[in-house]
């Protein structure tokens, strides 16, 4: 790892690689320190505990994940229903990569299912709400009749697709979710158009 990278960032990058590849419980602080090229004492200077490091790992994924989602939708062509289906196609493409191991937020939350107050769970929940908020804003700008409700439905499809692909190792689940998303968005557009029509 590049020695010019700030120490805290090196630790987070090392933790991210190991946590995503092996899971948070399977990875020791010693392993993270070794991969980051720092002592355990240095690691604990930057992070009070492994729990804090897990939360920092997810926090570091927050903005890049949101940016990727926005890019996938922006780069898609056609109507909004077309683009929404294409968004899930990009999810399927990502899942075909040999290094893909699912959604880091969902996997971490699952590992911490019996620890509702864990800081990483707070970060994960906030991220998922941001995704839902981004969808709602997108649908609001497009004139959908019920942008918040549609955003929640699409958010369920996203996380459902992530979970099903992880269980079955089959990207086809994202494609199926994309077909459902297309129908939901098209229906919302049609309802919105009827609501906006003059009487």
Image (tube, rainbow, N blue to C red):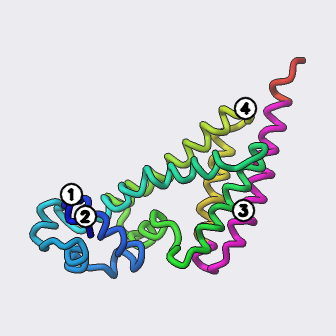
Give the residue at the far right of this rendering.
199
Q: How many marks?
A: 4
Name the residue nearer the viewer: 33 or 111.
33
Kindly identify which numbered label has been placed on residue 177.
3
- Part of the protein shown in magenta: 164-193
Closer to the chain start, of discs 3 and 1, is 1
For marks 3 and 1, give the CA distance. Answer: 40 Å
| Mark 2 → mark 3, Cα distance in angstroms | 36 Å
Q: Tag 3: Cα neighbours inside 10 Å, few (<14), some, or many (≥20)?
A: many
| First in residue order: circle 4 vs circle 1 | 1
Label 2 sits on residue? 10
Task: Report x, y in % for residue 142.
Answer: 71, 34
* Pointer 3 with pointer 4, Cβ within 8 A: no
CB of mark 3 within 8 Å of CB of mark 1?
Answer: no
- Of the numbered discs in the image, which one, if any, rests on residue 143? 4
Which residue is located at x 49 percent, y 55 percent?
65
Q: Name the residue rendered at 61%, 74% in the picture.
A: 96
The reply to whether callout 4 and callout 1 are in contact (CB within 8 Å) is: no
| Residue density around tag 2, few if under 14, some if 14–19, many if 20 or more, within 10 Å | many
Give the Cα distance between marks 4 and 2.
44 Å
Residues under numbered marks 2 and 1 in contact, where contact means CB atoms less than 8 Å apart:
yes
Return the x and y of residue 57 as percentages of the image width and height.
34, 62
In the picture, which quadrant includes the C terminus? Answer: top right
Per the model, the C-alpha gap separating discs 4 and 1 is: 45 Å
Residue beneath disc 1: 6
The image shows residue 26 at horizontal and vertical percentages of 33, 82
Tell me the element at label 3.
helix
């Amino acid at each position: 790892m590049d020695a010019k990278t700030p120490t805290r960032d090196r630790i987070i990058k090392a933790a991210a690689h190991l946590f995503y590849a092996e899971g948070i419980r399977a990875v020791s602080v010693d392993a993270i320190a070794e991969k980051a090229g720092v002592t355990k004492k240095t690691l604990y200077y930057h992070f009070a505990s492994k729990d804090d490091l897990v939360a920092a790992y997810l926090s570091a994924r927050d903005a890049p994940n949101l940016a990727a989602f926005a890019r996938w939708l922006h780069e898609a062509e056609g109507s909004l229903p077309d683009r929404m289906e294409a968004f899930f196609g990009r999810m399927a493409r990502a899942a075909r990569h040999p290094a893909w191991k699912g959604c880091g937020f969902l996997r971490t939350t699952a590992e911490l299912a019996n620890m509702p107050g864990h800081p990483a769970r707070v970060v994960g929940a906030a991220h998922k709400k941001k995704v839902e908020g981004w969808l709602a804003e997108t649908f609001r700008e497009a004139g959908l009749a019920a942008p918040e409700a549609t955003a929640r439905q699409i958010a369920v499809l996203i996380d459902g697709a992530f979970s099903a692909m992880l269980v079955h190792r089959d990207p086809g689940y994202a494609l199926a979710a994309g077909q459902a998303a297309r129908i939901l968005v098209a229906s919302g557009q049609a309802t919105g158009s009827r609501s906006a029509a003059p009487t």
